[in-house]
Image (cartoon, grey):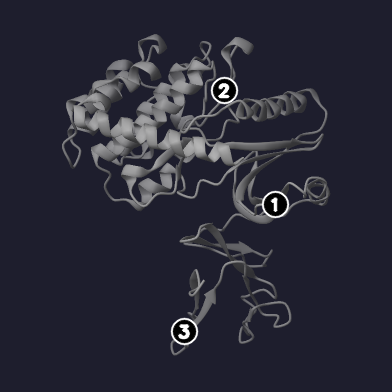
Amino acid sequence: MDSPSGYLHLEDAQLSDAKLIKIPIWPRDIVKVGRDPRSNTFAIETDVDNMVSRNHCEFYVVEYEPSVHYVYVRDRKSFNGTFEQCNKPPTHELTTLQKEECELFKDKFTVSRLCLGYGSEAVVHLASETNTHKQLVCKLITLGKANNKSRGESRKRILEADILRGLEHPNILPYIDAVISPHNIYIFTELASGGDLMSFIFRHDFITEFDTRIILRQVLRGLQYLHDKGIVHRDLKPENILFALSPKIAYHRVMLSDFGACGIPEKSRMLSLAGTTHYQAPEARHCTEAQTPAVDMWATGLVALLLLTHSMQDEYGPLNCLDPEAIDALVSELLDHNVTRISHEAKNFVMSCLKVPPLERITASDAVEHGWFCSPKMHLEFFQEMDQRMLSTQTQSMAQK
């Protein structure tokens, strides 16, 4: 590679005449910053107030594709912390036990200490196939101690791995393998280098209705596949909708991810509270009746509303506690007073998803055939060409395994 993935610009805000220092960040290199010159790539020895720790932070590159590199920052347990746009970056070190377990399967997978993100129940690490060096994602779930509640949670996590193992669809994040120990579950999936839908929304001031259709149609195809298999996702939201990297939205492959809350109605009463509050269907929020695939369609309607209006639920409040008339009025107001005109078909689709009675909601199978995705004919033909292209890509990928 002829040029670095990025540059680290160091500037002392306390000094008005300070010179700007520019440090290149190369793939496979880690730029360490701190006061101690012996253990850092760049030592800040002029920090008389000790605002910077001896070993403060480090920068590293994740090379998703030859031409696509992302730079990450990790705090090194500094005293004052490391902030990126006023937020602390995710940090997570493998425990001694996890390191020992990783040694047992190191001939197949390597789990790095580089953290790509974390949630309340899992940490996501960058990983790779040992032989091919292909970059992957490792979702690391720590199992609880052997009490009744934790045993139930452990079974739930193992179910997630089992469900993923049986899924194979262009619009589902590809599963690679899982390693299960009495203490941890390591789920390996492909790396979705395009990021999640929420990040995509934040990066774009405006998303056209046509692009919205491209995204949602793939979400619906993924849901249709799951529902046909008797699986309900139960935590559909923008953060769990991922993009495989592509230079143009018209060629983006959209994939559903994070099946930690999913359920199978035939094997469960499906009455437990699951998912993210703002995206829960009314029956899921109030636990009034068994959850069906209809809960995913409610969430799809909210994702569609977000894409079309760029309005966050924080701005207008959760819909799942309103009566049908109030929902219709609020959704109509958001769509009718949008900056750009929204088609009648788009409004009809959103409304058909956001019905309070689950049985009145459109199904994923019917939604794929909705007029919004099937007309005009030239658009339908374009969508079908995308389907074939993604299926071909998936077939080639499976053949290489």
Residue 194: image location, x then y, percent: 45, 49
Q: Which residue is mark 2?
A: 273
Q: Amino acid at mark 3?
A: Leu
Closest to the camera, between mark 1 and mark 2, is 1
Q: Which residue is mark 1?
A: 131
Q: Amino acid at mark 1?
A: Asn
In this orientation, which residue lies closer to the viewer: 172 or 209? Answer: 172
Mark 1 residue element: loop
In this orientation, which residue lies closer to the viewer: 156 or 288? Answer: 156
- Counting residues from the start of the chain, the first of labels 1 and 2 encountered is 1
State whether residue 252 is above or below residue 366: below
- Counting residues from the start of the chain, the first of labels 3 and 2 encountered is 3
Residue 320 placement: quadrant: top left
Mark 3 residue element: loop
Residue 156: image location, x then y, percent: 68, 25
Gap between marks 1 and 3 measured at Cα: 42 Å
Q: Is residue 300 left or right of residue 138?
A: left
Residue at the bottom extreme? 17
Point 62% across, 70% down: residue: 29
Closest to the camera, between mark 1 and mark 3, is 1
- Counting residues from the start of the chain, the first of labels 1 and 3 encountered is 3
The quadrant in which the C terminus is found is top right
Q: Which residue is mark 3?
A: 20
State whether residue 39 is above or below residue 303: below
